[in-house]
Each structure stands twice: as C-alpha cells, then as structure tokens.
Amino acid sequence: MTDTDDEYRPGLEGVVAELATQATIEETLFLLYEDRLPTPDERESLRASLAANRTLPAEALAAVRATAEAGGDAMDALRAAVGAAHVDYEPGDPAADALRAAAVVPTAAAAYWRYHENEEPLAPNPDLRHAADYLRMLTGEAPAERAVRGIETYLNAVVDHGFNASTFTARAIVSTESDVLSGVTGAIGALKGPLHGGAPGPVLDMLEEVHESGDPEGWVHDRLDAGERLMGFGHRVYRVRDPRAAVLSTAAEAFYAEDDAGFFESATEFESVARDVLRERKPDHRLDTNVEFYTAVLHAGIGIPRELFTATFAVGRVGGWTAHALEQLENNRIVRPRARYVGAEGRRYVPDDER
C-alpha cells in the first residue's frame, strides 16, 4: 500500500465534474504537479512550456512512420516515439522529463494517424492550447471551440485514476531510479492491453451494431445467451455507474445535432436497457456503465478515429503517469512486491536418464 495525493477517489464526483468541464488540460496538469490550480501567469507559462516541448526529434518521427508503414497500431507508435524522445534531449530533471513526456504524446499520436492516412505530419503550433493543437495536428484543420472543450473534458476526466495497471507500471519503473520517460514508455505498454485501454473502440462497434438492429433488448439477451460480455460495462473498482460516464455523456450529447440525434438516443436507450438486463440476469455481479461507454460516443462525435481511441486515452493519462512518477521519486523506495510460492515442494534436478 502506497500513500498518494494523486488519485481520483469515490466521493469526489462533483469536483471531478467541475474540473473536467471547466479546466484546461494545462490547469489540470498543474494541479497534479503542484497540488493547486495555477494563477493565469502560471497557466500561460505551463502552456508555453508544453508548446516548446511538443516537437518530436527526427528519430522519433522516423520511428512513428516506420510503425505506421509496417502496420503497427497507434500504441506501438507512441511507445516508440516516447522511447526515442530523449534523442535530442538528455533526461535527468524529473520535472522536466514529466513535461517532455506529457508534451510529446499527442504529437506522436497525431503523427501516427497522418502517416497511417498517407499524409505528412503537421508541426506543432506553439500559439495553441495543448488540446487544441492535438486536434489540429490530427485533422489538419483549426478545431472548433466546441471540439476543444469536448476533448479537454475527456482528457481531464481520465487524467488519473489511482493505481491502475499503467500507473503502477510507471511508478515501479521510476522506483528503480530510471528516468520518467522510461516510466511513461512502460506505462504505454500496459495501457495497450485490451483489459486496460482497449475497450472504447469495441464499444463503438457494439453501439453501431445495436443502432442498426433497432432492438437493443433482444441484442443484449442474444449476446448474454452466447456467453459474451457487454463492452462498456463493469469496472474493477466501481459497482455503480462510473461517475465519469455522467460527465462524458453530457459532453457527448452536444456533438449530436438533430441529424445525428438518433445515434445518441440509441446509445442512451441501449445503456438503460443493458443496465436493467444485467441487474436482472447477473444480480451478484453489479455490472454498470463504465467510462469507456461514453468515451466512444464522445470521440465519435468529435471525429477522432477509433484506431486512436486508446492513444487519446494516453494523451490524457500521461498527466497522471508523470504526476505519480514525480510523487514516487519524492520519497523513493524501490517497488518490490512479494510473491507467495504455491508450487511443488522438495523438487530436485533429475538427470536425463531418469526423466
């Protein structure tokens, strides 16, 4: 058990909603790093520092390009880019390393997608806010303020969530006195796993299929009868509706005008039906809506490709990884969990002729 100040805790739903819907990602990062909101001058200073660090070295861009051309996914590209981000930069100061990591992840994600689509990546624009520049580098167009607010709400909502697998990985790595960029590289590898960061894409696939079927209740029963799980439901911590889902649901609704309202209404109807059916059929499991459900709806509304859903998760969560890494280093002891041996006793080496 490790004490931490960098953690979302149940009971803070109102605070999380306020932060997610009102703060810029720069303000949230400053809060994680300094334990308070910044003054306007401090916010601008952090914005400028992030902008100054967003450019990837040529070697990192080459790694991203090679990954895309070889058919690798976005998380492979992020891992390669962050691993190469020190080529023109010498890690050493943990706070500077944290800022460097937070700055380059969105650049790498956007560059991967541009290469994936046979387009050249766009250089960062130092005049834009961090979230706005991510969308611009991704799409090639100046983002509407509504889109910036939507993605910023998402990034703030997922920036940290306790000792999840990727955060624990980052802390374990830096506890060896490795650098923060190495910790983030390892965390990206953990987030790549479908049990941690891979659900929003399949959620969108599911919602599109349900929308086409026009029969959400029948669809749910058919899947449960087949022994399949419903994507977007269930969480290792929550036994109630994930409070972040409410924040993202509200944010997502703004992107569905009258022409697209049917899809959002279909998603909310499906959520209601699925919750009722899960309570009826699995009363002991307490499976409820998790953050990935409305992440998929929001990202689709903003226009983020589903291939980048997990990478966009990393754009937000890197703030939590780096804050935890800095906290680990404040009073560091190497992370060394103990294992309980449950194998056979009294084993010995057996010569070849006795095997």
Image (cartoon, helix red, strand yellow):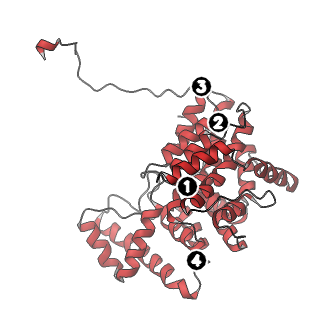
Mark found first going from the N terminus, 1 or 3: 1
Q: Amino acid at mark 4?
A: Glu
Kindly tell me whether residue 5 is visible in this rendering: no
Q: Position of residue 293 (x, y in %)?
A: 48, 66
Q: Are marks 1 and 4 in contact (CB under 8 Å)?
A: no
Mark 1 secondary-structure assignment? helix
- In-image side of 142 versus 65 (left or right): right
Left or right side of 27 for 195: left
- Mark 1 touches mark 3? (CB < 8 Å): no
Q: Which residue is mark 2?
A: 180
| Amino acid type, mark 3 | Arg
Dots 2, 4 in contact, CB < 8 A: no
Q: Nearer the viewer, mark 2 or mark 3?
A: 2
Q: Which amino acid, by three-letter code, is at mark 1?
A: Ala
Query: Residue 348 location, x and y as percent?
Result: 22, 13
Residue picked out by circle 1: 311
Say what secondary structure mark 3 lies in.
loop
Distance, label 1 to label 3, CA atoms, is 30 Å
- 93, 138: nearer the viewer: 138
From where the camera sits, is residue 207 visible? Answer: yes
Query: Residue placed farthest to the bottom in the image?
Result: 258
Question: Distance between the Cα atoms at labels 2 and 4?
Answer: 37 Å
Q: Which mark is residue 333?
A: 3
Q: CA distance from mark 3 to mark 4?
A: 45 Å
